[in-house]
Amino acid sequence: MTEERTRGWDFTLMATTILLLAALGVQSLAGTLYSWWAHDAFVNWESGPGYTAFVGVMDVVAAPLVAGIVVVLGLCVPKRVFARRVLVAVSAGLIPPGLVAGAVGRSLATGLTAYLVAAAMLQTAVVALTLARGGGVAYITEGRGRNLGSALLHLGFIVFCLVVVALQDAALPLMLGVFFTSAILLAAGSAMSFYSRR
């Protein structure tokens, strides 16, 4: 594959990820504003059927966005380690654990969680290989700091998706701990990606 085609592939994945995350952010903001309005407009809204219906609609809207982010991350993470012709096979290899877990648990969230855990394990290996300067890890940019920042950003996105998919009903300390871990990874990755020297 030529360098130009590689950069085109990377840009497509990057743009798709940004669009999906932006759409999820808009949905979250709209849901927050509606919840704030409904709290003042309806008595005991949080404990009534209106709130249950609202949560159901929010889940229906968010599900395809989260699934799309999961698929894009599944393509984006292993591309740093494997050639593009091997990428499809590796990405497909992340699917069976999700399918099995989803079938056993009879839950889309369980399947997505298993998929994200597998992707997180692979991305953790990418971070380790980047730190060790080995494994043939491929990046668009040059510089160890930027490359490590990119790896941490991807890991942070995956951990954040785990919070959205798997930890909404978990104990608050666990959810907050994982959420803050994703926030630290995203902040550190952003700083290293944008401010490291070549």
Image: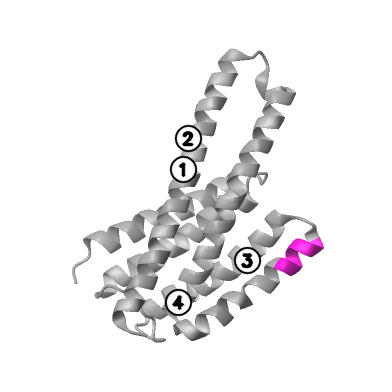
The answer to whether the residue labelled 1 contacts the one labelled 4, judged by CB atoms less than 8 Å apart, is no
Cα separation, mark 2 vs mark 1, equals 6 Å
How are the residues colored?
one colour
Q: Main secondary structure of the magenta part?
A: helix
**Horizontal side of residue 140 vs 114, given as left or right:** left
Task: Please report whichever mark, 4 or 3, sits nearer to the chain's N-terminal start.
Answer: 4
Q: Which residue is mark 4?
A: 79
Secondary structure under the numbered disc 4 in the rendered image = helix
Cα separation, mark 1 vs mark 3, equals 22 Å
Q: Nearer the viewer, mark 1 or mark 3?
A: 1
Q: Quadrant of residue 2?
A: bottom left
Task: Please report whichever mark, 3 or 2, sits nearer to the chain's N-terminal start.
Answer: 2
Amino acid tagged 1: Gly
Task: Please report whichever mark, 2 or 4, sits nearer to the chain's N-terminal start.
Answer: 2
The magenta-colored residue range is 99-104
Cα separation, mark 1 vs mark 4, equals 26 Å
Q: Which mark is residue 25?
A: 1
Q: Which mark is residue 29?
A: 2
